[in-house]
Image: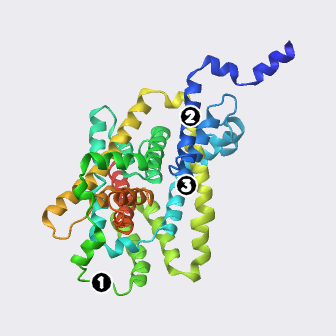
Amino acid sequence: MELLEKLYQMTAIQNMVDEPQILLMIFIAFFLLYLGIKKQYEPLLLVPIAFGMLIANFPGGQMGVEKIDENLTLYQIARDHGIMNFVYYSLIKTGFLPPIIFLGVGALTDFGPMLRNLRLAFFGAAAQIGIFTVLISAVAFGFTLKEAAALGIIGGADGPTAIYTTIKLAPHLLGPIAIAAYSYMALVPVIIPLVVRITTNKKELLINMKQQDKLYPSRRPIKDLQTLKILFPIGVGTIVALLVPSSVPLIGLLMFGNLVKEIGVSTGRLHKAASDTILNAATIFLGLAVGATMTAKAFLNMETIMIIVGGFIAFAISIAGGIYAVKVYNLFAKKKINPLIGATGLSAVPMASRVANEIALKHDPNNHLLQYAMASNISGVIGSAVAAGVLISFLG
């Protein structure tokens, strides 16, 4: 009987009996795994986050991220608080991983669609309205200005930017904000169609961008796109460094990653490393560590719930802001734009563009607008990072 009692004490069963909220968190983790594996909702993000959440909520495993004395050495953190706290405090809390992920994103990004359709890039800026709307609203609900800015940046739909901004402005909210940002990024295939259904009509969704190009061809076609694609990251990196220095860690590495991609064979090894090995490793560690912050103690409280609700509102307003910017533009322009282009002003590249393209094809099988959506989508990445830099400059 003593042996059986010791075996029972070794398990996590009694802990779950004493704290039934743990079972709720495990159920949520299983649900997120279902969305990532079965529904294919951004599995590269959702699967690591969900699995990190799962292993973090089993008592005794020391895999949950917790608040600890940040004066401890990394060795002490790993020895006394487990490997996941080591990953979190060394790679995420220091602000190391977000710029590294931007490096990989830049290496995977083709700015060609945006450069060919520069007028569409402005809708990426319009979609940032959710950031500032929720910032103001969050202050009204009792958050400090720095906390409200960290909450509002979720509206940019950019996980690394949200993490980086929160580290600089409200590090105590990093867990719930990271959870909200990455969860909503993974749920873009659900949120965008919902907002589009509320804010648009069928006639608007049937606007065919290729037909509009034929009716109103560009007066200034680009003669040497490849040279422009090399000069663009250099120019943007320089301008941003001069105007918004605090956003350089994100924009700078984004542009460097894109530059080594566009140069070609001579920097091929750098491009391969940035877009493959480095990005994949960073995504794994980031996803697991973010998921590990989602323990019952940290997640099931009113502040976290308010952040998640506020993040959803910021997300929805950003999508609607881009859509209504297109609607206003169409009132005055002969060359019409499909409102789905505005819906992709989020930073969730290329997921938002794929979702917009699927919606367009459902209404018209010949309405392929992926390359146009990417123009707005890519500019949204730059816009959210610059917005984060502005907030850090003013409030940091």
Q: Secondary structure at mark 2?
A: loop
Q: CA distance from mark 1 to mark 3?
A: 38 Å
Q: Secondary structure at mark 3?
A: helix
Q: CA distance from mark 2 to mark 1?
A: 55 Å
Q: Is residue 64 visible?
A: no
**Type of the residue with mark 1:** Pro
Task: Tell which tag, 3 or 2, sits nearer the viewer.
Answer: 3
**Type of the residue with mark 3:** Leu
Left or right side of 310 for 16: right
Residue denoted by label 1: 221
Closer to the camera, 187 or 182? 187
Q: Quadrant of residue 292?
A: top right
Classed neighbour count for the residue bearing mark 2: other residues with Cα under 10 Å, few (<14), some (14–19), many (≥20): few
Residue at image point 58% right, 34% down: 66
* Res. 67 mark: 2
- The quarter of the rendered structure image containing the N terminus is top right
Give the mark, 3 or 2, whose residue is nearer the N terminus.
2
* Res. 97 mark: 3
